[in-house]
Image: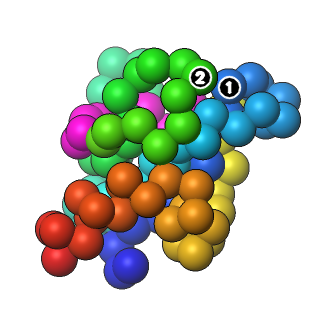
Amino acid sequence: MRGYRFFEEFNDEGRRNSSGNVIALDMHGESFVQEGGVCYRALCAFPDPGEPNRPVFERLFNAEYLGSRCRRISEDRAREIHPRLFKVLDALT
């Protein structure tokens, strides 16, 4: 899917315990600096630890979180982990 980068979200900073959810960064727009760091628009799961494949919403996302709690993954892997995210993304295209 063009224009998005996918990150698997983990429940721990050691990135050993996957949350079963994916963050899709929208690379169409530009990043910007907001209090607290660099931000991007993204589609991600509603916060509810312990539940994989959660419903998604659009929000501004702090890039620092990606470095500490996420790992970049391929679109194929993202589709396996979080099919609900791709129902939304596919509807946008």
Side of 70 relative to 41 (left or right)? right
Callout 1 touching callout 2 (CB < 8 Å): yes
Residue 58: x and y in percent read 23, 42
User: What number is the disc on residue 11?
Assistant: 1
Q: Is residue 33 visible?
A: no
Q: Residue drawn at (54%, 37%), measured in percent from left and top?
A: 52
The relative height of residue 50 versus residue 79 in the rendered view (above or below) is above
Q: Residue drawn at (53%, 28%), measured in percent from left and top?
A: 51
Asked if residue 74 lies in the magenta stretch, the reply is no
The relative height of residue 19 versus residue 49 in the rendered view (above or below) is below
Q: Nearer the viewer, residue 5 or 87?
A: 87
Residue 37 position by quadrant: top left
Residue 69: x and y in percent read 66, 32
Side of 25 relative to 14 (left or right)? left
Residue 34: x and y in percent read 31, 27
Q: What secondary structure predominates along the stretch shown in magenta? A: strand
Q: Nearer the viewer, residue 90 or 74?
A: 90
**Magenta residue span:** 57-65
In terms of secondary structure, where does tag 1 sit? loop
Residue 26: x and y in percent read 32, 59
Q: Earlier in the sequence, mark 1 or mark 2?
A: 1
Kind of residue at disc 2: Gly
Residue beneath disc 2: 50
Q: Residue drawn at (64%, 57%), measured in percent from left and top?
A: 72
Q: What is the residue that sits farthest to the left in this orientation?
A: 92
Asked if residue 60 lies in the magenta stretch, the reply is yes
Please state the total of marks drawn on the protein image.
Answer: 2
Q: Is residue 2 visible?
A: yes
Kind of residue at disc 1: Asn
In the picture, the quarter occupied by the N terminus is bottom left
The relative height of residue 4 versus residue 56 in the rendered view (above or below) is below
